[in-house]
Image: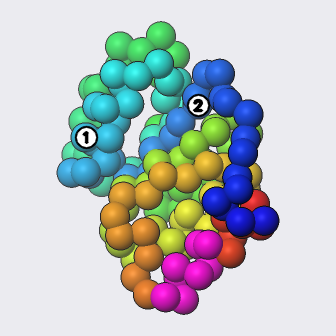
Amino acid sequence: MSVFDLKLPPISSLRIAFIGVGVRGIEAVKRYLQLEVQIVAIAEVGAEAMQKAKALTAHLPVRPAYYSAPDDWRKLCEHPDIDLLYISTPWQQHAPMAIYAMQCGKHVAIEVPAALDMKEIWALIDTSEKT
């Protein structure tokens, strides 16, 4: 199946998680706070960036789960109550994280660049078409 023909039913209440909320990631959190979405979880290994994310989301009626261990991003991918994972980590992590998230049945948004070489690009395309 080609992603160009992809048609999915709308998601009535989008449940989103963020992997990486450093400089660009925290700005994404701010943008999504302006929308009618539920922020379910945030994974960040940097203590200062995590504190900023916690401060931004402290007012939410249901606070997100916070994960700070290096491999906690995998828990987000496996979490059953997440529709979309927004990845804003160092570039070399983008493709592997996105591929794993798609294999776990998640929609994925990735900060640029999504991949570092053609092998990663094709792995992203192939995974998206399979999942």
Q: Is residue 122 magenta?
A: yes
Residue at the image position 67 percent from the left and 30 percent from the top: 10
Percent from the top left, x then y, of residue 120?
Answer: 53, 82
The single residue placed furthest to the top in the displayed view is 61
The quadrant the N terminus occupies is: bottom right
Residue extent of the magenta highlight: 118-125
* Tag of residue 15: 2
Q: Circle 1 sits on which residue?
A: 27
Which residue type does callout 1 highlight? Glu
Above or below — where is 95 with respect to 56? below
Front position in the image: 128 or 1:
1
Percent from the top left, x then y, of residue 29?
Answer: 34, 36
Q: Is residue 20 magenta?
A: no
Q: CA distance from mark 2 to mark 1?
A: 18 Å
Instruction: Classify mark 1: residues with Cα within 10 Å, few (<14), some (14-19) or many (20+).
Output: few
Above or below — where is 12 with respect to 3? above
Here the colouring is rainbow
Question: Does the image show residue 51?
Answer: no
Front position in the image: 32 or 69:
32
The quadrant the C terminus occupies is: bottom right
